[in-house]
Image: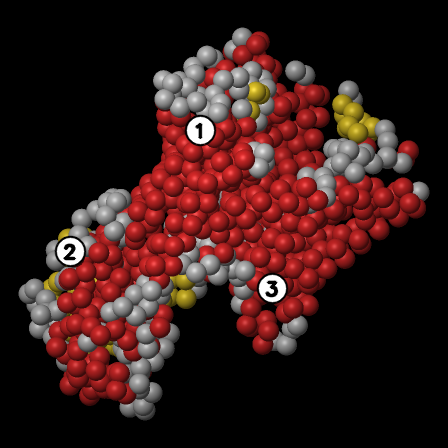
């Protein structure tokens, strides 16, 4: 396997007696969409939080394009090219959609010890932000306060913020959670349009979304990855069917 | 500086420490369970002291006065919770700080209206005066020894209630999971009122015990409150054990600092320099201690789990 | 159009403040010059707190520390014969910034209730330091015999000249905080207040930005302290008393948190209310306390929430 952008080895994380990550090995290839699925409580969010740097693993290592990033925290990983969306929508609710994305642009436009010029009228921040909003289909909603956006739009906005950081790796934690059919379809179409030019780790419950987007799928059960393979392989894998889909083999 | 004096000051430190603990326990419980920042906790300390002074004068009986003072503070605490604080549980810390700040202004002035601004002292009954001999050559005031005993007794009782009883289980569960407690069919409003009143009574107990040692005057609550904050920051918020350890450390460090820092500095500095620097440094000592603890352990010595 | 209401509001406020001294003198009510000067000095202090509390979400309950340090810098230098206002005010600002850097470096590592308690505790420490400074009057404080001197450019002993200087400095301070809050720097602060996890995820490390804001706020409040020392011709540890910190905080809230003009409205409201109540009864705090509680519960958006044009003023 050449061209692994991210390699996690032996990740362990416990909360008290609960082993949320119990020795996870995981690879993402440059350009692929790698989905992580698993039943509720399998430790998916704990896993992705260790990848993003929001949680520090108890043991194990994470390498990103050859560099050991295990000790780096979230802001540092973001500056290296990680971007994540959260399972529970995480945006700046008081700010407009445009300001949300402009902040993400700003975070990757050098230091922010600039004290005088009004940031809102800076074209260097606004123009790229607007372009990304157009790209995700929120262009017409740019001046709406984020809290007033529909749920689906908020999820889109979060993805827009992640993209605004020009990430090399996109970590999406249930991007279509809580969305209606139409909204889900729009998000899936959009994510499909990123395929090939964007490396994505996709944690998702919606199996239709997963099987239509993923190049590879890993199945996480009780803090362990029990199988990794193409959607076709996973679909027929007996162990997966037993552990995850609850079928008798 | 002889050994007996050091020993006596050490005991004074413990005595101050247990009073800090009584305050800190209530504050940390209320914060841990209701997520409420209550600046007015010091006001309850003051209310306890004043109520006891009046009740002792009125009944002419020390013990009866103390009991009335305690019961009164409990009621005042529950009243405050129902009237003012209940609406603040869902608000952010800023609102809680501001509203309880308003409570402090109110209580300080109310007390000044009723009892005046001059300091009062509680008369001790004759059976509490006098000294006990701890070892030969070392006598300690009986009353202060009693304060220590009461404080340690309360600490033990609290430990038992919180770790061994159904109420304690509810308290610990409430801290981590409000909805679960509500789902168990426990009246959470009542539980909160009771816990708050209980914390108020502990503060009142500290206040009324302080009467014969320190001055009873408007604003007395805030002096000790800020030291209690130091205790909680050092001990780790939400933790009774942390409050206990933090209180003893702060009580002892503060007391020994005030007693011995000046003479100690006198041995290395000129007498006038020691005279000037000693008291200043002594009053800053616990805050410096807090800064050091924070620099090493930002969560305090005993960070509470879960929250 | 909100822009017009905003311009109208500011024009009215500034015109009233400019016109106050001649009107008050004509009516022989010079007391009001004094009161408004005090209001504007506290507006500077409140504006500085607004930067970190309103925009940055840092609930500092120790902002009076910098008021005290600024005032003591003036008082101590004056005591030792240094009358130069440049020196005094420069020292006031620098010393406040340094202390803010130290307190901030420790306290910003924490958050929530810890932050509140730590800032309060450190200010209390400075208060006790002031109480124990034998040379500078301990708890009695001391008088300052001469006002700060500025090469004869302005005479602070003249109440009206001093008033206009304070007015100019206050407007400059409000404008400064306004610019800061809307700059890239301010956006980082506001974003971290709004959603810290999101900020970290897009690559901001808020600590240094918060610390910088804390230092700027401390320095600006130090200036307010230098003004206050000249206003009262007096310094005392009471400037650092924790109730003072609470008052400054209330000014920010009453005026409207995270608004440009809020600190001025808040300082005006609180100080005028205190003056009125105090003129009416000795026990005014018995009434002020519950009024403040009610304002927290029912009047959360502050004056800026009801004055037309003030929301974004």
Label 1, residues with CA under 10 Å away: few <14, some 14-19, many ≥20: some
How far across and how far down the image is residue A124, in percent? 15, 56
How far across and how far down the image is residue B226, in percent? 59, 40
Element carrying mark 2: helix
Per the image, the residue denoted by label 1 is: C161
Per the image, the residue denoted by label 2 is: A124
The chain to which mark 1 is attached is C
Q: Quadrant of residue A15?
A: bottom left
Q: Residue furthest top?
A: B270
Task: Tell me the CA gap for discs 1 and 2.
Answer: 44 Å
Residue at point 25%, 83% (across, down): A184
Please name which of the two marks, 3 or 2, marks the residue nearer to the observer: 2
Q: Quadrant of residue B194?
A: bottom right
How far across and how far down the image is residue C16, in percent? 46, 45
Element carrying mark 3: helix
Pick whichever, B289 or B97, lies toward us: B97
Please name which of the two marks, 1 or 2, marks the residue nearer to the observer: 1
Element carrying mark 1: helix
Label 2, residues with CA under 10 Å away: few <14, some 14-19, many ≥20: some
Q: Is residue A97 visible?
A: yes
Q: Are marks 1 and 3 on the same chain?
A: no
Q: In the figure, B119 relative to A15: above or below? A: above
Residue at point 27%, 63% (across, down): A100
Q: Is residue A112 left or right of residue B8?
A: left
The chain to which mark 2 is attached is A
In the rendered view of the protein, which quadrant contains the N terminus of chain A?
Answer: bottom left
Residue at point 30%, 65% (across, down): A96
How far across and how far down the image is residue C4, in percent? 34, 59
In the rendered view of the protein, which quadrant contains the C terminus of chain A?
Answer: bottom left
Per the image, the residue denoted by label 3 is: B87
Q: In the figure, B258 relative to C61: above or below? A: above
Q: Quadrant of residue B214?
A: top right
């Amino acid at each position: 396997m050449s061209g692994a952008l991210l390699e996690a080895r032996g990740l362990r994380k416990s909360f008290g007696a609960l082993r949320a990550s119990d020795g996870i090995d995981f690879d993402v290839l440059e350009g692929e969409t790698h989905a992580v699925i698993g039943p509720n409580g399998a430790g998916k969010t704990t896993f992705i939080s260790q990848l993003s740097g929001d949680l520090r693993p108890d043991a194990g290592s994470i390498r990103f394009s050859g560099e050991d990033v295990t000790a780096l925290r979230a802001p540092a990983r973001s500056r290296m090219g990680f971007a994540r969306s959260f399972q529970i929508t995480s945006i700046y609710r008081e700010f407009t959609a445009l300001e949300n994305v402009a902040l993400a642009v700003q975070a990757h436009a050098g230091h922010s010890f600039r004290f005088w010029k009004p940031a809102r009228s800076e074209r260097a921040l606004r123009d790229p932000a607007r372009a990304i909003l157009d790209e995700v289909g929120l262009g017409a909603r740019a001046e709406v306060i984020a809290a007033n956006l529909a749920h689906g739009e908020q999820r889109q906005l979060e993805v827009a913020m992640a993209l605004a950081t020009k990430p090399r790796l996109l970590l999406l934690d249930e991007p279509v959670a809580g969305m209606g059919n139409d909204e889900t379809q729009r998000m899936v179409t959009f994510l499909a349009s990123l395929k090939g030019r964007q490396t994505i780790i996709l944690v998702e419950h919606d199996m239709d979304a997963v099987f239509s987007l993923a190049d590879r799928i890993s199945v996480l059960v009780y803090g362990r990855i029990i199988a990794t393979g193409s959607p076709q392989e996973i679909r027929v894998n007996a162990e997966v069917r037993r552990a995850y889909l609850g079928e008798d083999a | 500086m002889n050994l007996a004096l050091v020993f006596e000051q050490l005991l004074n430190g413990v005595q101050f420490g247990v009073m800090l603990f009584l305050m800190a326990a209530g504050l940390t419980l209320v914060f841990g369970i209701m997520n409420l920042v209550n600046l007015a906790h010091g006001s309850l300390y003051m209310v306890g002291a004043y109520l006891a002074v009046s009740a002792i004068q009125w009944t002419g009986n020390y013990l009866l006065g103390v009991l009335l003072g305690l019961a009164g503070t409990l009621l005042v605490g529950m009243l405050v919770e129902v009237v003012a604080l209940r609406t603040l549980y869902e608000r952010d810390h800023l609102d809680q700080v501001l509203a309880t700040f308003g409570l402090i202004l109110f209580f300080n002035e109310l007390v000044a209206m009723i009892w005046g601004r001059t300091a009062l002292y509680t008369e001790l009954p004759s059976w509490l005066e006098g000294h006990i001999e701890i070892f030969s050559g070392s006598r300690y005031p009986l009353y202060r020894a009693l304060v220590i005993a009461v404080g340690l007794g309360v600490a033990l009782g609290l430990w038992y209630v919180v770790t061994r009883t159904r109420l304690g289980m509810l308290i610990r569960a409430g801290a981590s999971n409000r909805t679960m407690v509500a789902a168990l069919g426990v009246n959470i409003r009542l539980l909160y009122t009771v816990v708050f009143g209980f914390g108020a009574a502990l503060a009142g107990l500290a206040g009324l015990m302080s009467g014969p040692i320190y001055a009873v005057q408007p604003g007395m609550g805030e002096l000790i409150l800020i030291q209690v904050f130091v205790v909680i920051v050092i001990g780790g918020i939400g933790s009774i054990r942390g409050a206990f350890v933090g209180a003893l450390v702060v009580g002892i460090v503060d007391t020994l600092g005030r007693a011995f820092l000046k003479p100690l500095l006198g041995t290395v500095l000129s007498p006038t320099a020691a005279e000037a620097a000693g008291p200043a440094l002594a009053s800053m000592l616990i805050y410096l201690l807090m800064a050091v603890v924070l620099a090493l352990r930002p969560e305090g010595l005993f960070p509470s789990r879960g929250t | 159009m909100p822009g017009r209401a905003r311009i109208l509001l500011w024009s009215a406020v500034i015109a009233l403040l400019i016109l106050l001294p001649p009107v008050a003198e004509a009516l022989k009510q010079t007391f009001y010059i004094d009161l408004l000067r005090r209001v504007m000095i506290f507006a500077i202090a409140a504006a500085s707190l607004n930067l970190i509390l309103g925009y940055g979400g840092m609930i500092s309950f120790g902002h009076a520390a910098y008021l005290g340090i600024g005032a003591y810098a003036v008082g101590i230098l004056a005591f030792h014969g240094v009358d130069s206002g440049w020196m005094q005010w420069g020292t006031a600002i620098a010393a406040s910034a340094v202390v803010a850097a130290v307190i901030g470096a420790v306290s910003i590592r924490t958050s929530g209730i810890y932050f509140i308690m730590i800032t309060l505790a450190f200010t209390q420490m400075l208060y006790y330091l002031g109480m124990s400074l034998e040379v500078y009057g301990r708890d009695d404080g001391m008088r300052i015999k001469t006002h700060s001197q500025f090469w004869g450019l302005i005479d602070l002993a003249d109440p009206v000249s001093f008033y206009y200087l304070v007015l100019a400095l206050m407007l400059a301070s409000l404008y400064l905080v306004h610019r800061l809050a809307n700059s890239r720097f301010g956006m980082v602060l506001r974003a971290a207040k709004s959603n810290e996890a999101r900020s970290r995820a897009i690559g901001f490390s808020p600590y240094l930005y918060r610390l910088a804001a804390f230092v700027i706020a401390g320095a600006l409040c130090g200036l307010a302290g230098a003004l206050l020392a000249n206003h009262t011709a007096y310094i005392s540890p009471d400037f650092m008393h924790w109730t003072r910190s609470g008052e400054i905080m209330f000014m920010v809230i009453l005026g409207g948190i995270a608004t440009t003009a809020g600190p001025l409205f808040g300082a005006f409201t609180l100080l005028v209310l205190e003056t009125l109540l105090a003129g009416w009864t000795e026990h005014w705090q018995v009434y002020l306390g519950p009024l403040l509680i009610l304002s927290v519960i029912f009047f959360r958006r502050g004056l800026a929430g009801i004055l037309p044009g003030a929301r974004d003023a």
